[in-house]
Structures are given as C-alpha cells and as structure tokens.
Amino acid sequence: MCDETTAADNDRHLAGFSRRDFGVAAAAAGAMALLPIPANAAAVTGRDVTIRTPDGIADAYFVAPTHGRHPAVLVWPDIMGLRPAFRQMADRLAQSGFAVLTVNQFYRSTKAPFLKPGQSFDQPEVRAMIMPWREPLTPAAITADAKAFGTFLDAQPEVDAKRGMGSTGYCMGGPFVFRTATALPGRVRAGGSFHGAALVTDAADSPHRLVPQMQGRYLIAIAENDDARAPTDKDALRTAFAAAKVPAEIEVYAGAMHGWCPPDSRVYNAAQAQRAWDRLLATLAIL
C-alpha cells in the first residue's frame, strides 16, 4: 500500500537515508537510472494525447513503434502519476513492439505531471495533496475509464486491434489492471501488477474476486515488505487464479520494497526491476 506505514518500511530499508536527503538523491537517481534499451529496439514515436471519458478529458502519453501495427498496452502509473519515469518506461515497452498508452489517472482533479523535482509521496505535504484525488477513483470510475482508454487505443493506426490488449499497473494501478480486464472482456488477454495495492480485500468486488471474469495470462509481482504485512494475500490470489483456470505467475520479489520498479523511486531496485520487466515481456508475449 502507498501509505505512511510503507514509507516507514522504506525508511528502515534505506537505513540512514533521511527524507531530507531525498530531494537531492531523487534528482541524482533520475539522472542515473536510465533504463536499458532492448535488444533490437524498434524506433518509436510518442505524443501527448487527450481522451474523452464520461467524466471529462484525460491527459495521457501514447507511444508506439514508428512503423507497423502492434498489440496495445494500457499502463496505470503509481500514485505519483504520469511523469518522466513512466514516459521512459512506456518508451521502453514500445521499443519492445507494443503500442503503449500511459494515463494520468488523476485527470478529474489535475493534469500531469503534478510533482516538482524532489517531491515524493513519502512527504506529508505531498500525501495531503494527492489523497483527495484518489476519492473519485471508484471501481465504477476505473471501469468507465478503462473502456474509454480501450476505445482510444483501438482507434489508433499503430494498434493492431485483432491482437489481444495488455494492461500493467503499479502500486495503486495494480488493482486497476484487474478492473481493466473485466471492463474489456475478451479484449484484455494479459496483464501485470507490480507492487500492487489492495489486491485482496474483504469487499465483494475485491480485485481477487474478479479473477473468474478475466481471460489470458497475468503476472503479479509482490514487494517483500507488502508480503510481510499481508502474507496471506499471495495465497488468496493463487487460489483465485487456479480456481478460475487463469494462468498467473505470482511471486514475492526478495529484497524488493514497495515501489521498486519505477526508475525514479528512492527504493528502485535495478536487478529486481529488470527481472520483473523480463517477466512482463514474457507475459505479454501471448498478445
């Protein structure tokens, strides 16, 4: 989860790396954590786009190989939203042969990017700013957004709509992958959740209860500290996927803390992020 407890976990993990240090370190990390370019990377072209939804106009970033038509992937960022790190991740996925739409999930409240250099969700004032923006993101709202974003993707000339669509989500975006798969039944055939928050809850519409409505293949990559706080979640997920006969790779990534995948995260773990990325590409290969 993206909350004060997770921030405290990450503080302990970094041992001596104070939040006051984070502003300088984040800038340094952003400069150093350049993602590797895939072998045989395709030339890509990206553009800022706007998408009409039932609740307004969403801003987003779309990028795809410069030539040809390709399977679409809808990306839900973590709680710090659409920003340079996620554009970099989108470019890398496009270089691997996908047409990628990364959205500003907070478009009802603000445009992206909304963080200043050095700001992080770990900072109380940033949490106070962002938390109200989460309130409109109900399951019904995410379902409606997923449908609108899927329609946009299928209308793009770079997208091969005859092939399956994928979706990935990070932190708060993890459960949105499940809701995307149920919003676009038969269309979404692969997905990945990375340090996803609240995948297993007591609610009747908990993401793990949606698995019987999902199709395709899924990757659920769990942070070590998230697993320590909710050690039975992975078992509930495995049971749900197995009962629905939906293939899923569900794994706790040793030594990886909540937020380890984006290259601008202060707990970015390059080795485990690369491993998760490799497993994502293997999962999306079904498309």
Image: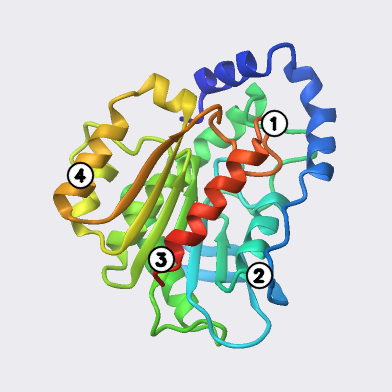
Q: Which of the pair 237/101 is nearer the observer?
A: 237
Residue 164 x, y percent position in the rendering: 38, 74
Dot 3 or dot 4, earlier in sequence: 3
CA distance for labels 1 and 4:
33 Å
Q: Amino acid at mark 4?
A: Ala
Nearer the observer: mark 1 or 2; the answer is 2
> Can you tell which quarter of the image residue 46 is in?
bottom right
Say above or below: 9 vs 271.
above
Circle 3 packing at 10 Å, graded few (<14), some (14-19), many (20+), is few
Which residue is under mark 4?
Answer: 240
Identify the element where label 2 is drawn. Answer: helix
- Note whether 67 is above or below 33 in the view shown: below
Labels 1 and 3: the sequence-earlier one: 3
Distance between the alpha carbons at the discs numbered 4 and 2: 33 Å
Across and down, in percent, residue 168 comes to 47, 55
- The numbered dot on residue 101 is none
Q: Position of residue 270 (x, y in %)?
A: 67, 40
Which label's residue is closer to the chain start, 4 or 2?
2
Image quarter of the C terminus: bottom left
Q: Which residue is identified by label 3?
A: 54
